[in-house]
Image (tube, helix red, strand yellow):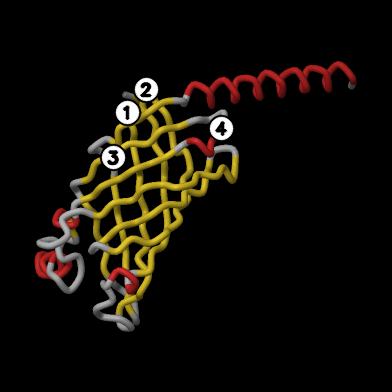
């Protein structure tokens, strides 16, 4: 029994050491790859709603596994690239009633604080700027995979649209926009 426990303890120590080595291997600056996906949904009373994604975006994240608080992320997306599969809805979203892409061609997110909340996950706080209005928002990121010099994070979060002046259609359409993103990064 003691021998089995000693072997199990040895395996746990080796696994912990391998995990620590894996985490430190992640340190670096990563460019957000075009293969990433930034999707969103807005619910509607009675079901349905609007589901869409943005096809043009850029940004980078920097990871410091030994001191997660030093990590950061910056994303810039072009709301004119919104896609819902319905041209009429896309044109409405681009109009001055929602994104107002003529006056505000970008939406940005800049992290101000990253806090680890699990072995492979973190809470990301930062400022979101849309339609010229900047507010604090929070997202949750989970490491979804790694492949050589590339990483992928699954990032989710809910944002109220009314503070950004995009509350057209409420209460028929929810005031909450749910973001569901797969951000892939390539080490620079």
Provide the residue designation for mark 4.
67
What residue is rendered at 30% in x and 36% in y? Answer: 32
Q: CA distance from mark 2 to mark 1?
A: 6 Å
Q: CA distance from mark 4 to mark 1?
A: 21 Å
Q: Is residue 4 left or right of residue 154?
A: right
When the figure is inspected, residue 77 is found, relative to residue 58, above or below; the finding is below
Q: Nearer the viewer, mark 4 or mark 1?
A: 4
Disc 2 packing (10 Å; few <14; some 14–19; many ≥20) = few
Q: Nearer the viewer, mark 3 or mark 1?
A: 3
**Do the CB atoms of the residues marked 2 and 4 lie less than 8 Å apart?**
no
Disc 3 packing (10 Å; few <14; some 14–19; many ≥20) = some
Q: Is residue 123 left or right of residue 169?
A: right
Q: Return the x and y of residue 172 as percentages of the image width and height.
A: 30, 83
What residue is rendered at 25% in x and 55% in y? Answer: 107
Q: CA distance from mark 3 to mark 1?
A: 11 Å
Chain-order first, disc 2 or disc 1 = 2
Q: Which mark is residue 59?
A: 3
Q: Return the x and y of residue 38 as percentages of the image width and height.
A: 29, 50
**Do the CB atoms of the residues marked 3 and 2 lie less than 8 Å apart?**
no
Instruction: Please state, as top left, top right, bottom left or bottom right, where the C terminus lies in the image.
Output: top left
Chain-order first, disc 2 or disc 4 = 4
- Residues 41 and 81: in front is 81
Chain-order first, disc 3 or disc 2 = 3
When the figure is inspected, residue 83 is found, relative to residue 119, above or below; the finding is below
Instruction: Please state, as top left, top right, bottom left or bottom right, where the N terminus lies in the image.
Output: top right
Chain-order first, disc 3 or disc 1 = 3
Provide the residue designation for mark 2.
149
Provide the residue designation for mark 1.
186
What residue is rendered at 26% in x and 68% in y? Answer: 50
**Do the CB atoms of the residues marked 2 and 1 lie less than 8 Å apart?**
yes
What residue is rendered at 14% in x and 71% in y? Answer: 96
- Residues 7 and 30: in front is 30
């Amino acid at each position: 029994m003691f021998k089995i426990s000693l072997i199990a303890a040895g395996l746990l120590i080796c696994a912990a050491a391998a995990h620590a080595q894996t985490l430190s291997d992640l340190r670096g600056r990563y460019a957000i790859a075009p293969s990433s996906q930034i999707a969103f949904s807005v619910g509607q009373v009675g079901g349905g709603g609007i589901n869409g994604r943005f096809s043009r975006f850029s940004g980078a994240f920097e990871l410091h596994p030994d001191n997660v608080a030093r990590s950061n992320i910056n994303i810039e997306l072009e709301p004119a690239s919104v896609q819902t599969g319905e041209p009429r809805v896309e044109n409405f979203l681009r109009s001055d009633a929602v994104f107002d892409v003529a006056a505000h061609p970008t939406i940005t997110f800049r992290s101000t604080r990253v806090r680890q909340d699990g072995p492979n996950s973190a809470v990301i706080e930062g400022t979101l700027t849309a339609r010229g209005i900047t507010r604090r928002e929070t997202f949750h990121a989970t490491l979804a995979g790694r492949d050589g010099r590339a990483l992928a994070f699954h990032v989710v979060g809910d944002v109220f649209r009314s503070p950004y002046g995009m509350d057209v259609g409420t209460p028929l359409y929810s005031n909450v926009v749910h973001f569901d993103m797969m951000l892939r990064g390539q080490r620079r």
